[in-house]
Image (cartoon, coloured by chain):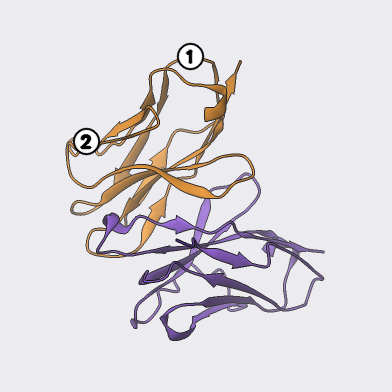
Chain colours: A purple, B orange
Amino acid sequence: GAGVSQSPSNKVTEKGKDVELRCDPISGHTALYWYRQSLGQGLEFLIYFQGNSAPDKSGLPSDRFSAERTGGSVSTLTIQRTQQEDSAVYLCASSHRDKEANTQYFGPGTRLTVL
Amino acid sequence: GNSVTQMEGPVTLSEEAFLTINCTYTATGYPSLFWYVQYPGEGLQLLLKATKADDKGSNKGFEATYRKETTSFHLEKGSVQVSDSAVYFCALSEPGGFKTIFGAGTRLFVKA
């Protein structure tokens, strides 16, 4: 079946602009995660959604970052007033806790470059 | 809080050498443990996992055993290939929850 998809694959923006990154999880997966991977770095947890529960936003680095998940499926990560330090690859993953021990399936990522 | 610590890289090996990448964790209860791999230019994908103590996960010649007594999940392969060059991430999934915590990643270079 279809995997996790993300769009756009690349985004170049100017400092101060807002950007929206989209994630389509695997159908039926109840959990959705956003991570940030800076060049040569590990994964930085940003936020996750599980079903209808309140999201865990503990990893969002500032109030410029927000995310929503509509209808328990597609998610959008929004970064307002982008800064150069926001440049990174943003990864989305989905999982189904009750199956596969919460194995996460990752999308290809969105590479964000802030000029 | 829960955490994952893995050996720093990069690790450089010759083809057919033995590989060990150390991973230790701190967690309450019994988390599930994972190794994910990121090949150059590709996204992360699951390599192997173990869900309870003494379980051994294996895939593509890689193995890791869930050691509760030493809180470890070291990744091993008996004979690496150039195609194994990648970044390897150790991770744990909190018991009863959804949050997954990743280690910093270990970059492996295998020379022909």
Q: Residue at x 60, y 59 (%)?
A: A109
* Amino acid on which disc 2 is placed: Arg
- Chain ID at mark 2: B
Rendering coords of residue B23 (x, y %): 36, 36
Label 2 crowd bin: few (<14), some (14–19), many (20+), radius 10 Å: some
Q: Residue at x 39, y 54 (%)?
A: B101
Nearest to the eye among marks 1 and 2: give it: 1
Residue B61, placed above or below residue A115: above
* Amino acid on which disc 1 is placed: Glu
Task: Quadrant for residue B61, please give it.
Answer: top left
- Label 1 residue SS: loop
Label 1 crowd bin: few (<14), some (14–19), many (20+), radius 10 Å: some
Q: Residue at x 37, y 46 (%)?
A: B4
Q: Return the mark for residue A107.
A: none
Rendering coords of residue B35 (x, y %): 39, 42
Q: Which residue is mark 2?
A: B67
In front of the other: A89 or B59: B59
Distance Cα–Cα, label 1 vs label 2: 26 Å
Viewed as shown, does residue B85 lie left or right of A27?
right
Q: Which residue is mark 1?
A: B16
In the picture as drawn, the residue positioned furthest to the bottom comes out as: A71
Rendering coords of residue B75 (x, y %): 37, 31
- Circles 1 and 2, Cβ within 8 Å, touching? The answer is no
Task: Quadrant for residue A19, please give it.
Answer: bottom right
Viewed as shown, does residue A11 lie left or right of A102?
right
Residue B45, placed above or below residue A20: above
Q: Quadrant of the C terminus of chain B?
A: top right
Viewed as shown, does residue B4 lie left or right of A107?
left
Among the two numbered marks 1 and 2 on one chain, the one whose residue lies closer to the N terminus: 1
- Label 2 residue SS: loop
